[in-house]
Image (tube, rainbow, N blue to C red):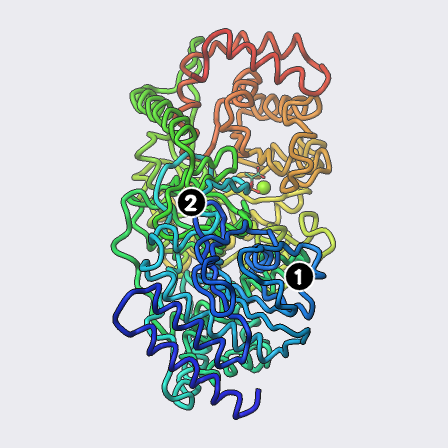
Amino acid sequence: MTEAGWTGSRRLLRRIREVMAAAGDAAARLDAVVRLIAADTMADVCSCYVLRAGEVLELFATEGLRAEAVHRTRMRVGEGVIGDVAAYARPLVLEDAWSYPNFSYKPETGEELYRSMMGVPILRNGKVIGVLALQHRDSRTYAEEEVEALETVAMVLAELIASGQLVDPSEATSTEDVVKPRRFDGVTLNAGLAIGTAVLHRPRVVIHQMVAEDPTSELARLAAAVTSVQERLDKLLAADDLKAAGEAREVLETFRLFAGDRGWMGRMREAILGGLTAEAAAQKVQNDMRARLREATDPYLRERLIDLEDLTTRLLVELAGAERPGPLPDDAVLFARNLGPAELLDYDRTRLKAVVLEEGSATAHVAIVARALDVPMLGKVRDALLHVDDGDPVVVDAANAQVFLRPADEVRAQVRAAMVARAEQTQRYAALADRPAITRDGRAITLLLNCGLLLDAANVAATRADGIGLYRTEIAFMVRAAYPDVASQTSLYTRIHEVVGGKPVVFRTLDVGGDKTLPYLHADPEENPALGWRAIRIGLDRPAMLRQQLRAMVRASAGRTLQVMFPMIAEVREFERARRLLDLELRDAAAAGVTPPSDVKVGCMVEVPALLFQLPALIRQVDFLSVGSNDLTQFLYAADRGNPMLGDRYDSLAAAMVAALRTLIETAAAANKPLTVCGEMAGRPIEALALLGLGCARLSMSAAAIGPIRALVLDTDTRDIDRLLHQWDGAPAGRLRRVLSDYMRDRGLGR
Ligand code: PEP
Ligand code: MG
């Protein structure tokens, strides 16, 4: 736009603001505004449509169309030019509106006199709340600047519509969203149910001042805010704190890409020159981005737009400040694009009922924390943030990976009933917590916990588990921005021992690589990361790193039993080499006068099928075995454990897996070496039943599984299961699972 154009635009905005601020009836003010716009733009018609409940756009004010059409002319979203502007949340410019395929003639308006037309959406928080349109008698085109200028006016007008003086406030903010319940599908990151109130992790920014007096000072504010956002991002990434782990690094990259970009900065600058404040300009650009996001299907473009939207939100917060609307409700369902583990921990757990993320994956660190806190969590809920607002009622059914926004009463009732049943069940399990896990036929079963944070180590006391069967040390490494030194590892492992109060803890050495990456451990990208440079392979190639970890474990176990196991061993020799490194650390500790552990047990994880063919040699070397059934199944069937397409294809109770487990359990028993199963199957009732029948006496699982599995153990006669396993030995895949499931149902087990 030219300088004269900007000056004109600023003058118009100022006059609109004066009219809007004047006393009197809101409808009269809207009439005056459309008159002003028509005069200023030299349009024959200027009309304002407001979105009402039921997705209807109603003509609220016009200069040029017949006055009797006001409040009479109504069209649905998606009907005619106006309806399409609202449906796509994008401007429409038509040289000849009559030839527009979706044109809808409304005779009462007298619009047959006008040929050309331009409509822009009136947006608030990225949602359409109305349409502003210009019409001309002659067929003419509209320049891009004219569209921009009308969009700017629409921003200011949005305030009048949203003020609640024209229509009821609940309608004013409505799009189809307020009227209709919505369902979103995602991916379960932690199962569970919740009924609650939506809370946006980044609250919407409320802009109090739309029109600015002095564009120069607004441009300076914008520049200062951009610098400050950049500094904050830099600091976040440099800081050795948990938050950095969750903050997408891409945001910073996007920032670097766009900070000097004309398309982003340039458009905000232009909006400021057109008369908006810096924050209103940022919001205008954000509105546009949201509209594009709704339409974008290309994954790369979507990703970029989401990053840019995130960045613009940060800028808005910087410019206008974001206040959380009141305290956190006590039934909060948190909505975020993504969250870092520490950001999640910042929320009051007692008020947090569920978390919904637009991104996130089962292996994300925040999902691990959610499981530790037992907060239901859904990920990959696409576009949830485009539709949710602070305070919306929400139902989360994380087990079925669904979120219901503004749910119908029946949905609420159903979920409430399911929650009551779940709570009753939890109480039943709690009542059993103090009973030793002994089967009906008198076999004592050791129930252990899998954990990776101090937080879930505390569950040992709550669940009365017999100790920690798998402490995944990599989790603590993953949520840090830098490699933790020996001292901080030592203090963490000491705390773990303290938290479990003398019960046994099995530390697993670092199992990174594959899907578990450390931001500070640089490795070349691999074609097949699950089969690549990971776990003990890294440890043996970087013995100094592994030794540091073993040193910390030795020191933390002073005077206590140290139990260590190594992940992803494929050859007995690897186990021997790893064990030797531990021996060196024990020797050095003794030489340095460090109090030694009272006892040392060294175990091997069985995750790689090759070990099944080295058992006689392996069993002589180890103090115990721990079966990582997640990886063992994945490698036995060559089926990616994280790929949902393969989720149901390979059964962990199929004959090959059962045979592998039987061999392992029998070999360990014959050698009198303890064997634990610590993969997910140990915590799933049907699989656990099979494991009990196979003679496994040690199961390690997540905290939520301890109650149900204890109940199962108490009700099971393992001789029955042993018989069934022999009877159905070698049966086709799926058969054994059905047999065991029927057995459970017939005896009322697992209820
Ligand atoms: C497993 O593979 O079963 C296991 C327990 O290890 P992780 O799930 O940490 O790979
Ligand atoms: Mg594993």
Residue 60 on image: x %, y %: 43, 60
Picture residue at 36% right of the left edge, 86% below the top: 213
Question: Mark on residue 370?
Answer: 2
Picture residue at 67% right of the left edge, 48% below the top: 530
Dividing the picture into quadrants, the one containing residue 352 is top left
Q: How many marks?
A: 2
Q: State the residue in front, 23 or 347.
A: 23
| Amino acid carrying mark 2 in the image | Ala
Q: State the residue in front, 631 or 645.
A: 645
Image position of 679 (left or right of 129): right
Question: Mark on residue 300?
Answer: 1
Dividing the picture into quadrants, the one containing residue 211 is bottom left
Camera-nearest label, 2 or 1: 1
Q: Is residue 679 above or below residue 217?
A: above
| Amino acid carrying mark 1 in the image | Tyr
Picture residue at 36% right of the left edge, 28% below the top: 416
- Label 2: how many residues lie within 10 Å, few (<14), some (14-19) or many (20+)? many
